[in-house]
Amino acid sequence: MKTNDLVVFFRLNDVERPVIKLIDREHQAVLAFIHMEGAHVTVHAQSKDRWVTMWDKRYSSIWSENRVAIAQNLEYRDPNKHAHYPLQRPSGPPEIPLCSVLVDLPSIVHHTPSRYRKNFTVVDAPSEVFYATIYFSKEHGIDGVAGVVVFPVAVGYFFLDVSATFGEETEQT
């Protein structure tokens, strides 16, 4: 299975930090938040549709025990991880964000593994602390919008909006 990895660095003045790792496979794309201990959004290709999941170990709900029990009954390898999915749904329209993540550049560890510099891109950050909002579309749909970066993947397109700074209200279109 061919995998294409891309690391997204955010830069403000002389501060540059790796924040997102994009893993592109034939039938799914994973957008992992490096600074959030494994939190990630995955888009899975399922026939004509796309299914979106988000995993974050900080998340649990009243359904968490039931999810773990179901995963145990199905003999999944790691049933406990199924307690931490705040998002599991069809991809929906591209104007509805999958998630927004608060990025605090100065708090992200300075050490950058050399493997992150093999295939990377750098995005200008609007401020030291800002929101990175992730959108997805099966078809290309957002071009030329200020602050939006497009990442084509095998299953569609991720859109990264870094135009909102912490404390500002974002306008939904």
Image: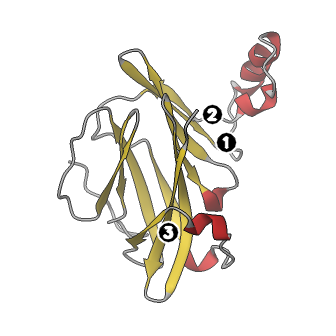
**Cα distance, mark 3 to mark 1?**
25 Å
Amino acid type indicated by mark 2: Tyr
For the point 40% across and 35% down, the residue is 154
Observer-nearest residue: 159 or 121?
A: 121
Label drawn at residue 84:
none
| Crowd rating for badge 2 (residues with CA inside 10 Å; few <14, some 14–19, many 20+) | many
Q: Earlier in the sequence, mark 2 or mark 1?
A: 1
Residue 46: quarter of image: top left
Position in image of residue 102 (x %, y %)? 51, 62
**Cα distance, mark 3 to mark 2?**
26 Å
Q: Earlier in the sequence, mark 3 or mark 2?
A: 3
Q: Earlier in the sequence, mark 3 or mark 1?
A: 3
Is residue 155 positioned above or below 3 on the image? above
Q: Which residue is mark 1?
A: 59
Amino acid type indicated by mark 3: Phe
Extreme-left residue of the structure: 144
Foreground mark, 3 or 1, reads 3
Q: Which residue is mark 3?
A: 9
